[in-house]
Amino acid sequence: MRTIDDRIVHELNTTIPTASFVEKIDAGQTCKELYQSLMDAHTSRERVIKNCIAQTSSVVKTLREEREKAQDDIALLKQLRKEQTKLKLMQSELNVEEVVNDRSWKVFNERCRIHYKPPKSQ
């Protein structure tokens, strides 16, 4: 899911020309396309992670309610703890996603700032 972020430096090095080759390639269009790809990828990943968090939160809530009714059920307790751990991991994945996104935008801005000015939403 993070292929575009993992390869952004390579992508920029192979598509954005140096000063001597600037006339041969439309760097503005290339940066615009890369910007759109980054936005799409980041939005999609964030949506998927938040959807997983919502689903797991729902499962945790249900298990907590069941646990209130059957406090002696060890299997239920284990399942609840397993789902709570999964929820924490997914929430931490949002933090990882933020770091990855920040890195990608930093690299993008360093290389494309003179060729393309993104809309203010970023």
Image: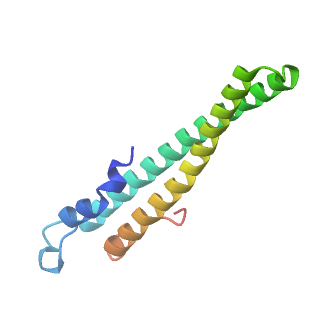
In this picture, residue 62 sits left or right of residue 42: right
**Res 95 visible:** yes
Residue for point 53% across, 46% down: 46
- Vertical relation: 70 (above or below) 78: above
Q: Relative to the observer, which residue lies in front, 76 or 56?
A: 76
**Res 118 visible:** no
Residue 116: quarter of image: bottom left
Residue for point 63% across, 44% down: 88
Q: Name the spot of residue 45 as percent of width and height, x first.
A: 48, 44
Q: In the orientation shown, which residue stands out farthest toward the right?
A: 69
Q: Relative to the observer, which residue lies in front, 59 or 45?
A: 59
Residue for point 67% across, 26% down: 79
Residue for point 68% across, 27% down: 78
Q: Name the spot of residue 73 as percent of width and height, x first.
A: 77, 20
In this picture, residue 54 sits left or right of residue 49: right
In this picture, residue 14 sits left or right of residue 57: left
In this picture, residue 121 sits left or right of residue 2: right
Q: Name the spot of residue 55 as percent of width and height, x first.
A: 64, 31
Residue 114: quarter of image: bottom left
Residue 66: quarter of image: top right
Q: Relative to the observer, which residue lies in front, 10 or 43?
A: 10
**Quadrant, the N terminus:** top left
Q: Name the spot of residue 72 as percent of width and height, x first.
A: 82, 21
- Vertical relation: 74 (above or below) 99: above
